Each structure stands twice: as C-alpha cells, then as structure tokens.
Image: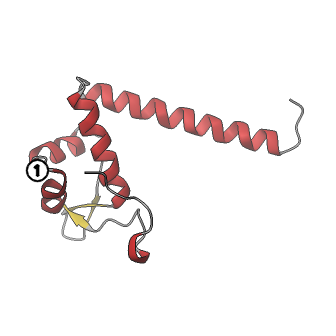
Amino acid sequence: MEIETTNLFGIDADKPIYSIGQVSELLDVKQAFLRRLDTEKVLEPIRSEGGQRRYSHNQIAMIQKIVSLTSEGFTLAGVNRLLALEQEVKDLKAEIRHLKGSGRPK
C-alpha cells in the first residue's frame, strides 16, 4: 500500500501525528522493527511530550522505502548508508542549481 505524502486534508506531511501502533498496523510491520529503526538511527521519529514516538506522513513513506530495501537484502546499516548518500546527492544537486543560478561562470 503506497502512502500519499502530499498535503492531505490540509495536514502538513511533516507533522508527527501517528503513533508507533498506528504505523505498525498501517504498514503491517512489527513495532519492534520501528523501534530498531530509531535505536539504529535509520529513522528517528519525533517524541511527544510524554516520550512516545510520533511519525509523519513523510516518515511513513520513508519506512515503506526502508521495508522495501530490507526485503531486497539490505541490512539496516546498508540502508542507513544508502539514505545518507541519497541525501548527499540531493544536497549537491541543490548546490549546483544554486551556483548556476547565481550568475557565476560555469
């Protein structure tokens, strides 16, 4: 099941509103797996004032991606490295766009 990450019903896709139980049920994954993603720093949910994990739409989409990668044989350490590299590429592309737009020589 693909989770839509656009602004649903005016809800910010980065707003942490789902509990670990809701995400577990929604994605059909064990809560222990979600806790492990947090402890291994693969995906860290926001904590409520009471210390409970809360997930956003965007984090749920990321969990789907992580589940897919682990089902393909990636370890969580491998997933973590892949996600870091993807973010680095995204940041570098943004920097290139910025530099091209600033009128600097190519």
x 9%, y 47%: residue: 30
Residue 22, how many percent across, how many down?
A: 16, 62
Q: Residue furthest bottom?
A: 10
Q: Quadrant of the C terminus?
A: top right
Indicate left or right for 7 with 32 as reference: right
The three-letter amino acid code for the residue at tag 1 is: Gln
Residue 12, how many percent across, how many down?
A: 43, 69
- The part of the image, by quadrant, that contains residue 76 is top left
Secondary structure category for the residue under label 1: helix
What's the coloring here?
secondary structure
- Can you say whether 84 is above or below 17 in the image? above
Indicate left or right for 93 with 62 as reference: right
- The part of the image, by quadrant, that contains residue 16 is bottom left
Residue 15, how many percent across, how many down?
A: 37, 67
Where is mark 1, residue-wise?
Answer: 31
x 25%, y 26%: residue: 72
- Can you say whether 16 is above or below 92 in the image? below
| Classed neighbour count for the residue bearing mark 1: other residues with Cα under 10 Å, few (<14), some (14–19), many (≥20) | some
Indicate left or right for 37 with 9 as reference: left
Residue 4, how many percent across, how many down?
A: 37, 58
Indicate left or right for 98 with 52 as reference: right
Question: Disc count in the image?
Answer: 1
Between residue 28 and residue 102, name the one nearer to us: 28
Q: Residue furthest front?
A: 1
- The part of the image, by quadrant, that contains residue 5 is bottom left
x 12%, y 60%: residue: 21
